[in-house]
Amino acid sequence: MTKFLSRNRHTVQRLGFSFITLMALATVLPIVGTIIYILVQGGSAISWEFITGFPHDGMRAGGILPAIIGTLYLTIGTAIFSVPLGIAAAIYLSEYAKDTQWTRLIRLAIINLAGIPSVVYGLFGLGLFVLFLQFGTSILAASLTLSIMTLPVIISTAEEALRSVPQAFRTVSISLGATRWQTIRKIVLKEALPGILTGVILGLERAAGETAPILFTGAAFFLPRLPQSPFDATMALPYHLFVISTQVPEMPIQIQYGTALVLLVFVLTMNLIATVIRSRARAKRQW
Amino acid sequence: MEKSLNWREFIITRAIKASGYSAVVFVLLIFFFLLREGLPTLSEVETSSLLNIRWYPIENYFGILPLITGSIIITFGAALIAVPFGIGTAVYISEIAPRWMREILKPLVELLGGLPSVVLGFLGILVLSPYLRILLDLPTGLTAFTGSLLLGGIAVPTVVSVAEDALDSVPRAYREGAWALGATKWQTIWRVTLPAAKSGVLTAVMLGVGRAIGETMTVMMVTGNAPVMATKLGSLFSPVRTMTATIAAEMGEVANGSTHYHVLFFIGMVLFLISLIVNVIASSVVFRSKKRAERILS
Amino acid sequence: MKRILIIFLLFSFMLTSCGSADSSADIASDSPAQYIENKGSDTIVNLALAWAEAYQVDHPKVRISVTGGGSGTGIAALVNGTVDIANASRKIKDEETAEAQTNGVTPVEHIIARDAIAVIVNPNNPVNELTLQQISDIYSGKYTNWQDVGGEDRPIVKLSRETNSGTHVYFLETVLRLGEKENKTLFSMDTLLLPSSEGIISEVRQNPNAIGYDGLGYVPDDLKMIAIAKEAGGEYVLPSIATVNDKTYAIARDLYMYTNGDPTGIVKDYLDWILSEEAQQIVADLGFVPAK
């Protein structure tokens, strides 16, 4: 068998390459197809009223503004908690930590946080923020839960970005008399900023699209007005899509696809921004 | 000026050091909470009852075996799809594709990783499940298989990303050596590059599998949620109920502190431990990578 | 980069102010808006939403938020003290009442509408009528093929609501167990437990093997309802407002709202309005049965 394969190895290669290429296409085409499908089906529902109006008639008509705003609030809330903490932790890992058992423990913890199922985060958020700390079903509880979930992503990307800044930058700065923190703040962070930003945006994109963590910690079926304080519950796009596609009878299919489209656009835009930042930074890089 | 600068630097450095340990704090916190609310299960429900095959919490049947088998069979199905397609795509991107194609494909695959699971579940109910029911002549399209297909799609970006990194970091010299000895590109990939990247590819698969086990919304919407023991191969084409969907579906209803509440946290603990074990194994497999970030990202 | 950030912030600010225009009406008026939190049964949720919308038209100072999650969820929330009104499509259980009392909550029951549970099948399914016993046997797994009940040679795919649903519990007690307290029949393990009423509808609509059950208010015209006889040889009856009221339809039930103690203030006003003719008309419009 091996002899046959070796003698005809160029044919085997051609066949093999075609097969692998097909596989790759089979992986990628459904993605494109899905996006186009949702675009086509949901496009007709999109209007200014849809994006800025409140739902009417048992949510079967009108707009999805509260869900959009809710997702916005949750994303901002998540950013507030996870970004400073995440970047600080990344700075520690990249600039201060030595390769000890403790550091390895931290890295293990980060990998673990990244792997925890989203519904377990929801449980944790329910137990700690909603019940124990008595924040109730609120934007606060949901944002805190989402930020712990987003933390590993931000820490890893930020650390990568910081690490990729050449050591020479730091050495020169120190030799000119700057303190470590001054070096980090004025030189390293600045250079690593695009990479860090990419990671932050991709992490927040994930948080914006998640449903399970907010199910018990902050999401509401229907609210008559926008949330006024962090202690209010809120509607949110992913939960709203779940609800209208499974809980409400006679929901026009247009609205379902339209909501899916809005969520998709929200998420894809963030992805696009992150990708653009990343490639722009790579091009401008001076090292 | 000097003094205040030093003082400020000191505070900031301390704060940064504290942040560094925050990840450990959180993991311990989560574990502690799950334990606190989940352990009472062992005193409230007999172990033999937990290992029962019937899950019907409102009549105090707390057998979690069907849920575990449900999660396992879905993950198995998802791995069956994610591994070949994931590794295949990674090989394509890393070894075969021309440069311009690579620049298009990488972001596209990453895009798939960003698709919210609820959107996939939504399409699953509306489009995929009726289609599969007709195509495969099944009693219903809400099956483990449908879930596996979608989960495979969710896990693929993780596998592709990490595996592609692993393949990329194989030194060029390995390939060139093989070519110099007369091997075709194809032979090189399978006999030299891939084996060299073995540990990284394995990590990729484990991370992808970890992602599949933990998925919630998609499976809740398309797998039918029937608590059967999914032990035969044919179970793949029948409805199943996963641990994650159970928690998501039932958590809202439980009274704080009831036995059902504790059992759900117990299941959460089981999930946590499973992902812990998978991650410990994956990370102990030595994998030096420049782009560690992108791995965890997807 | 900074430009993008600024544009993004401006855009979100714009969106937020669009929404606030709605609530600024509250701020402008002299007394602040008051809130009623309403949570619970998914069967009732759309009715509750319709009521909330209609009520708020005439009472703009009262804001009602409505959430589903199942009867169990609503009652649990009442017990935890996080809602004013819990919607339930089943009576509160003894354990829940006990739990409530340890939390200092006294649940008070109000019947706000009545509902028939329709057993539905795909329009292409030739079976039109079943006895209660047959339905029980289907769901407990005794019958697995449509042929067993006079239909085609097809497997029976059983759909049900999740265990947290009041509808589920009611179906268990009244149909599977035929209303007998001693009966311990359970749903067969391969019954699909779908997280919502609508999930059942969409599966039955496109799957000829399926059988499901749902509140009458949820069943659209294009699905077929089964006429049910209480006993073999009895009369087969389709669910409707008439047959629920004269008790010839076998699976009918009351729908409840629970409050903590006797209602006062805006909650009392709201509950009184719910029992008024205007609100009960909405009940009928949505396919439920008015409480009187």
Image (tube, coloured by chain):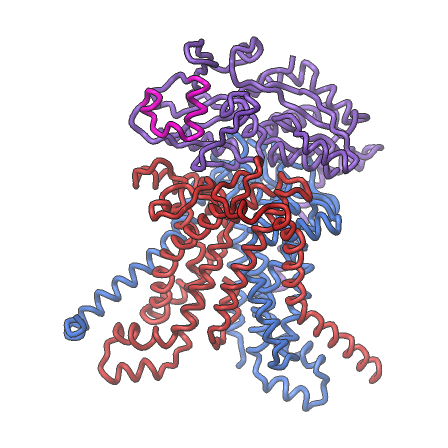
Chain colours: A blue, B red, C purple
Where in the figure is residue A249, as x and y percent of width and height?
52, 29
Q: Residue at x 34, y 28 (%)?
A: C145
Where in the figure is residue A236, as x and y percent of width and height?
61, 45
* Magenta-drawn stretch contains C145: yes
Q: Can residue A152 be seen in this snapshot?
A: yes
**Quadrant of the rendering where the N terminus of chain B is positioned:** bottom right
Where in the figure is residue C194, as x and y percent of width and height?
49, 36
* Magenta-drawn stretch contains B260: no
Given the current orientation, which residue lies at the most extreme bottom position? A175
Q: Residue at x 44, y 9 (%)?
A: C234
Q: Which residues are magenta?
A: C131-151
Question: With respect to residue C60, does B229 lie above or below?
Answer: below
Name the image quarter holding residue C63: top right
Task: Answer with left or right where residue C206 lies relative to residue A238.
Answer: left
- In terms of secondary structure, what is the magenta stretch mainly? helix
| Residue A132 or residue A281, whichever sits in front | A132
Q: Can residue A76 be seen in this snapshot?
A: no
| Residue B226 or residue A65, whichever sits in front | B226
Question: With respect to residue B134, does C261 lie above or below?
Answer: above
